[in-house]
Image: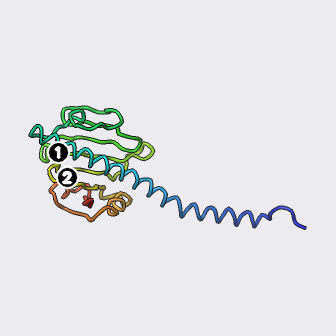
Amino acid sequence: MRKGFTLIELLVVVLVIGILTAIALPQYQKTVLKAGVVDAISAARTIASAQQLYYLNHGSYTIKFNDLDITLPGKLVRQEASVQELNIGDNVVAQLVQNASAGIQTNIWSNISGKPTTAGIRVLDFAKGDLYCTAYKNDPQGMAICESFGPQVISPAACNNATWYCYSIKG
C-alpha cells in the first residue's frame, strides 16, 4: 500500500495550477482595471451634472470642486490657476482643467496600485454631458478597456488627437 504522492503527481498538480493562474490572472487584472474605469464614469457623470447646475445658476462653468453642489470624498492634491486635482478614492483621481481652446473640462483617471492607467474618462462638453473614454494610441490594454464602453470617435475636435483615441460612452 502506497502512502503519499509521487513526484510526478505533484509536478502535474503544480503544472495545472500554473496553467490556470496564467489564464485567470490577465482576465482578473483587466476586470480590476475596468472596475476602476466604471468608478471614473460614475464620478464624471456626477461632476458633469453639478457643472450643469452651476452653469444654470452662474452663467459659466467653474474650475473649483468646492463651487459645485456635490460632496466628493477624498482630498485636494493639486490646485493651480488652471487646474484642480482631487483624489476621490482609492482608484480614482479627478481633474477640473481650464483649457484655452476647449474651455473647462473634466478628466478622471483610474489608478491601480498607485500606477496611473492610460485609460481615463473625459467630459469635453458639459452642455451636452457627453462622456469619452480615452486611451493612448500605444496602449492596447487601455484601448481594449475603452472599446468595451463604446465606439471610437474623432469628433469633437479634442478627440482628433495625435496622442490618444476617444471612445464614446453610451448610456
Q: Position of residue 17 (x, y in %)?
A: 63, 62
Q: Position of residue 2 (x, y in %)?
A: 87, 66
Q: Secondary structure at mark 1?
A: helix
Residue linked to disc 2: 129
Drawn side of residue 137 relative to residue 98, left or right: right
Query: Residue at image x 52%, y 58%?
Result: 25
Label 2: few (<14), some (14–19) or many (≥20) C-alpha neighbours in 10 Å? some
Quadrant of the image for the N terminus? Answer: bottom right
Query: Residue at image x 25%, y 58%?
Result: 166
Residue furthest left as drawn: 59
Q: Measured along the vertical axis of the image, is residue 164 above or below residue 96?
A: below
Amino acid identity at mark 2? Gly
Q: Measured along the vertical axis of the image, is residue 167 above or below residue 52?
A: below
Drawn side of residue 76 relative to residue 4, left or right: left
Q: Measured along the vertical axis of the image, is residue 109 above or below residue 2?
A: above
Q: Secondary structure at mark 2?
A: loop
Residue linked to disc 1: 52
Query: Residue at image x 42%, y 42%?
Result: 114
Amino acid identity at mark 1? Gln
Drawn side of residue 112 relative to residue 41, left or right: right
Label 1: few (<14), some (14–19) or many (≥20) C-alpha neighbours in 10 Å? many
Q: Position of residue 32 (x, y in %)?
A: 44, 53
Distance of label 2 from label 1 (alpha carbons): 8 Å
Q: Measured along the vertical axis of the image, is residue 103 above or below residue 171?
A: above
Based on the displayed image, in which of its 4 quarters is residue 84 positioned? Answer: top left
In this orientation, which residue lies closer to the viewer: 111 or 150?
Answer: 150
Q: Position of residue 74 (x, y in %)?
A: 36, 35
The answer to whether the residues at label 2 and label 1 have Cβ atoms under 8 Å apart is yes
Disc number at residue 82?
none
Based on the displayed image, in which of its 4 quarters is residue 58 positioned? Answer: top left
Counting residues from the start of the chain, the first of labels 2 and 1 encountered is 1
